Amino acid sequence: MDVSTCLKSLLLAIRQYRNNKSALNASQLQKHIEDVCGLKCGVVLFSGQLLPSECLSGLMEVAGDPNTNHTLTGTIISLLAQFASDGEAKEALHSSYNFTGTLAAIIHCNTTTPEEPLVLQCLNVLQRLTYNVRTLHCVSHIHELISFLMQHVQSSNDDTVKACLGLMANLCRHDISVQSHIKSQSNVKAFYRALINFLGHNCLTVVVFALSILSSLTLNEEVGQKLFNAKNIHQTFQLIFNITVNGDGTLTRNYAVDLLVDLLKNPKIADYLTKYKHLSVCLSEVLGLLHSKDPDTASKVMELLVSLCSVPVLRKLVCETVLRPPAPRIQPGTRKGVQARGSEPSLALVHWVTSPLDGPEQCYMQALSLLTELFEEAIDSSLCCSAQSFVELLLQEVLVLLQSPDSTEGDQLLKKHCLRAGRVISLTLSLLCGDDALRMLVSQRLSPEVCVSQVELLLSYCQDLAGSTCTTSNYQLSQVCSEVVLKTLELMSHLKQQMPDMETSFYRILQDQRMVTPLSLALTSNCREHVQVALRILFEAAPLPDFPSVILGDSIAANNAYRQRDGELSIRSSSACDDVSFAGKSFSMMHAEPSGSAYHSIDSLIKKLRNGVELQEKVKDVHMSEVIDVYEQKVSALACKESRLQDLLEAKALALSQADRLIAQYRCQRAQAEAEARKLASLLKDTERRKEDLQTELNDQLLEVERLKSDSQQLLEHNSRLQAVADQHQELKGTYNQLLSRYDKGEGMLKELQAAHISLTQQAEGLKKINEGFKLQQERTLAEMAEKEEQIKGLKSDVQEKDRNITGLQNELKRQEEQIHEMEENISILRKELNKTEQARKDSSIKASSLELQKSQLEARVEKMEEDLSKHTQMIAMIHSLSSGKLKDVTANLSL
């Protein structure tokens, strides 16, 4: 089933379920929703077309109905939550379809049962949907949602606590209205105490959420000054860096980085960070994350580094850490993981810059922003020379990104290409502010053809978009293309002096009529930088003869008129939005959603309003005047668009009239050119006659020139002979000078060698005397050695005699032990006989006592013999230490 058929079936099922909320219709609708989930049709759903928009509006209405089954509501939320990570779909859900208000309304209806899985699902989706997105103050039930979060942050369910804290951190960040509402609550002090208690939680995610909320609410108050003072801030820094480097989840790392980015906006905390003693180590570890394969992690790390570059001291440290040359590997035994983390983060930046266009946009955009910051710092400091090799590698890879993309890739990839190309050109322009070597590198790597092809492609896209349907996406794409065109022209303006071909192409493009659109959009822009670039380009283009200044003025006037009407419309729309949101609070939850105010299309509703027919039952309580005001705003918006199209049509008519004037000028110039051609033909005939006369004179001059050539040839030969003699004289002179210098060097060397000879002779005499002394000492040593050898021989004989004595004593000891063994056997026999008769026992005891006496005598003798053995052992050890004999063998024998 294709996407269109599936969406039509889904819309039909939604209408059937709204008319009759039966179980069968609910199951059919859930089946169709599951079919849409399997198609992966996010691009079609958020394309802005009528069918997908009605499907999304119907799903919002069904999900927001309190009578809808929780299972069906959860299925719808799961379908829409799939697109909460995509940037454009997330923005559409948040602004166009008010998905945030729908989820807040669902939570408000289930306030009494916060343990429901649907409530937790809504909290998790809201957390993803509101991350880095500011919530509008007119969103329905936003105050009730904040009260729910403040009440349930101390829930017993950890998942609910984590979801509430994460959502509260998103809502509080950069939203003063939400912060003021929270501070005005009566239980705000208890809320602060709960957040402070969470700082000791065992889950790091909860700790980061609590810190983020506290920094948003209390950073400039007394509570925040106590929490983030000089004593505690270093622990906070350590916690944030630990989570960033060693965090096991992307969610916790993202919130930790956001917390540090917010804290750095406070000058006092930024100053604390510059004095943090572990900053260099932490920065090296953070830079190691650039080698991660996860683009989300790398993007968040680069966002942190860009934020650090906002502080001058930290910017210099980051620049030195990233752009310094790699240190030599002195210790080869270092762990591989440590080497990988510290290995050239600049190469990782180049890798992320050159990542494909269909990858995450934030990744290469953050990398280009970081490189721009680093090179601005390097050019201002002394790191420019050390980073020159990296600049050469970077330009080789980055300037390839300026090549024109394939026209069949679609508007989405074209917009991404324009955004990245704009950052690349900004980076290149920052390099042109450096020394001459950097400018030379840029001029060598960049070719005029690349710039011209890109400008031609984008100008043709701008022209096609101007002639197509006027939509918001087309207008945004036209603005992006115009910005890149102007930046490319500014780059060409900087390089036109070094590259002559670039100058020709630059002035040719400036006279193209298609340049009117980029210049008019930039000159009427709200961005100061765009206006300044457009003024610089206009200053270059205004003196050119074919520059379309009249058309440019008309286009600027049309843009100003459109902006004025758009501003008036936005003011009236905002007041109407406030009125609708105020009135919606008194109605049911379904009526609070703009998309669910009626079941039929806008045309049918307008028809019914004109005929004076009452609305359906679910909207009959709405005041007719309020509904008419809403649709009057929509009609006025359509009228504004029509007026802008009329202005564009008038601009086209002016362009056509300008083209007619140019055609007339061309015809006049052509007639003048033909008259000039006829005049040139007559002049050509006169010139030919003069040519014949001059030819004869030229022949005479050639003869004279030949004679002069022969004379000059002779003079040259004579001059060459003289030159050869002069060269020989110079060679002889040089040879003489060389020999003279060699003679001087030889004489100096002779004197040095004579002095060295004298000193060596004296040293030799001294060595002879020392040698004689050593000989006498050697003779004395030999005599002493002979005496020692005689003593050693005597000691050896004594040792042998002692060994024999020890052997006899050992034999006697063995005999004694055998006697003891025999006596013990006799004792055992006597004990057996003792059991037979008591008389025998008495006799045996007498004999045993006598035998024990003998045994004690034998033991005394054995102890005495052991003492003698120990004395002999000590003597043998002393003898062995003198003779360096086999002490180990003797000790072993003695122990045996």
Image: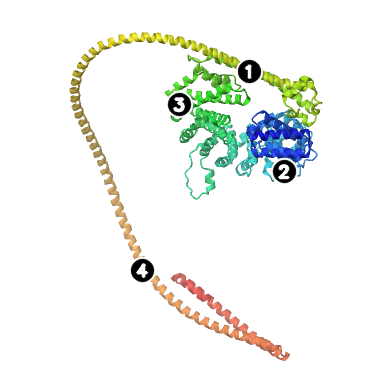
| Residue with the mark numbered 1 | 644
| Residue with the mark numbered 3 | 448
| Residue with the mark numbered 4 | 783
Q: Say how many tags the image has.
A: 4
Residue 461's disc is none
- Which numbered mark, 2 or 3, is in the foreground of this view? 3
Contact, mark 4 vs mark 1 (Cβ under 8 Å): no
Q: Quadrant of residue 271?
A: top right
Q: Tell me the CA gap for discs 4 and 2.
A: 95 Å
Residue 95 visible: no
In what element is the residue under mark 2?
Answer: helix
Residue 159's disc is 2
Contact, mark 2 vs mark 3 (Cβ under 8 Å): no
Between discs 4 and 1, the one toward the N terminus: 1
Percent position (x, y) of residue 588?
Answer: 80, 30
Percent position (x, y) of residue 442?
Answer: 46, 29
Q: Tell me the CA gap for discs 1 and 3.
A: 37 Å
Percent position (x, y) of residue 60?
Answer: 73, 33
Question: What amino acid type is highlighted by mark number 1?
Answer: Arg
Q: Tell me the CA gap for discs 2 and 3.
A: 58 Å
Between discs 4 and 2, the one toward the N terminus: 2
